[in-house]
Image (cartoon, rainbow, N blue to C red):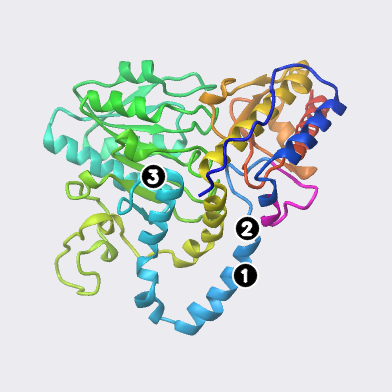
Amino acid sequence: MSTDPTPDFGSVDALQVPRASLEAEASALDADDPLAHHRAAFVGADTPLVYFDGNSLGRPPRATADRLARFVTDEWGGRLIRGWDEQWMQLPFAIGDRIAALALGAASGQTVIGDSTTVLLYKLLRAALDAQTSRDPQRVEIVVGRDDFPTDRYLVEGIAAERGARVVWVDVDTSRGVDAELLRAAVGERTAVVLLSHVSYRSGYLADGAGLTRIAHDAGALVLWDLCHSAGSVPIELDAWGADLAVGCTYKYLNGGPGSPAFAYVAARHQHTLTQPVQGWMGAADVFSMGPVYRPADGMRRFLSGTPPVLAMIAMQDSLDLLEEAGIDAVRAKSVALTEFAVRVADGILSPLGVRLASPRDAAERGGHVTLSHPAMRAVTARLWQGDVIPDYRDPHGLRIGLSPLSTSFAETLAGLHAVADAVRAES
């Protein structure tokens, strides 16, 4: 992992500046960027297309095409079923541990690659709720933010109905997220589990992982962190936070590809006390005994269910190589610089058009994306896509600018925001 000092990316004061000055600044920032050379490692980064959606689906590393081709011919085609004995059975744990070390601040033996984000969230949330209510029958409440990602909210409602629990909704400003004051007001002696997003999917609000975990624990609750919009972009310290559980996807900043499998973290202290509800052969104590009774394995294997998605795990390894070379602290420094530059440009060329920042202005409270609000943003997004500028849209009236640090340049960011300005004028 890189140990280079955090670079000085310059001032980002919100001043209106002419286009030539912004272009000169973007050029200077790219020239001084110690991670700039990584951009060439990604497919499509050398084209005029502006990609503002790395927080939804990351660009593929060029090396991944060769890796997948070799896997098909050499491992799948050459080793055939022998591959399971030789290495495939251990991939969920080996890659899980690597993600844990590079991006999660977690010791080995606590992270596994498995199913989709939705399935893993279901498993861990159900397991945590059951463990808490078994310990204390009055703990029947699940706390979740009303503006969390739909999957999180839908799962909470479904599990509450399934298990006779109650949902406690935390109302938040859609330009922020759940903070300490809101969480303190929501938890209490009946709280079983708190489901929290480290980075809010809509606004990019960056939650205080250690502080919110402490508040939940003080109330006797377990915490399940959704890391989908932070893993690979923002430093995470699950072990240092005292986190209980976490789930995150690998197709955003970890560039695992469309539909790549999610990861699950279960703190070592909980692994023998949680019973995950989807009992499959891969989570059994003796996978190949095919016995008549299910007995869960020790450790993280017990949180697997079905056959591991080997092809999908193979695809994410090149991105992990890049992350290891860069180091998560340098990635975060570049991310802050990109989002601050985007905010400055938006203040200069979009604010006069009625565009409002719908993300925290303080970089310490912001993850890797910026949301810009204007009544015409749905039409603006459609117009931009037609012109090969690719952000995404989120209600209400939000255009998300996702800036993946290893594959995005300052010049690309500026070009895309000028296109946003042109589209807003055209649609207003």
The type of residue carrying mark 3 is Val
- Mark 3 neighbour class, 10 Å CA radius: few under 14, some 14 to 19, many 20 or more: many
* Residue at the image position 39 percent from the left and 70 percent from the top: 88
| Residue 399 can be seen in this image | no
Q: Nearer the viewer, residue 38 or 219?
A: 38
Residue topped by disc 1: 66
What label sits on residue 23 in the rendered view?
Answer: none
Whether residues under marks 3 and 1 lie with C-beta atoms below 8 angstroms apart, the answer is no
Could you say where residue 397 lies in the image, as x and y percent from the top left?
64, 26
| Image side of residue 210 versus residue 277, left or right | right
Could you say where residue 10 lies in the image, as x and y percent from the top left?
69, 27
Q: Is residue 191 above or below residue 352?
A: below
Residue topped by disc 2: 61
Distance from Cα at disc 2 to Cα at disc 3 = 23 Å
The type of residue carrying mark 2 is Pro
The type of residue carrying mark 1 is Asp
Q: Is residue 256 above or below residue 87?
A: above
Could you say where residue 418 lies in the image, as x and y percent from the top left?
80, 31
- Give the mark nearer the N terminus: 3 vs 1: 1
Could you say where residue 383 lies in the image, as x and y percent from the top left?
77, 37
SS majority, magenta: loop
Badge 1 element: helix
Examine the image and state in which quarter residue 64 appears: bottom right
Q: Is residue 42 magenta?
A: yes
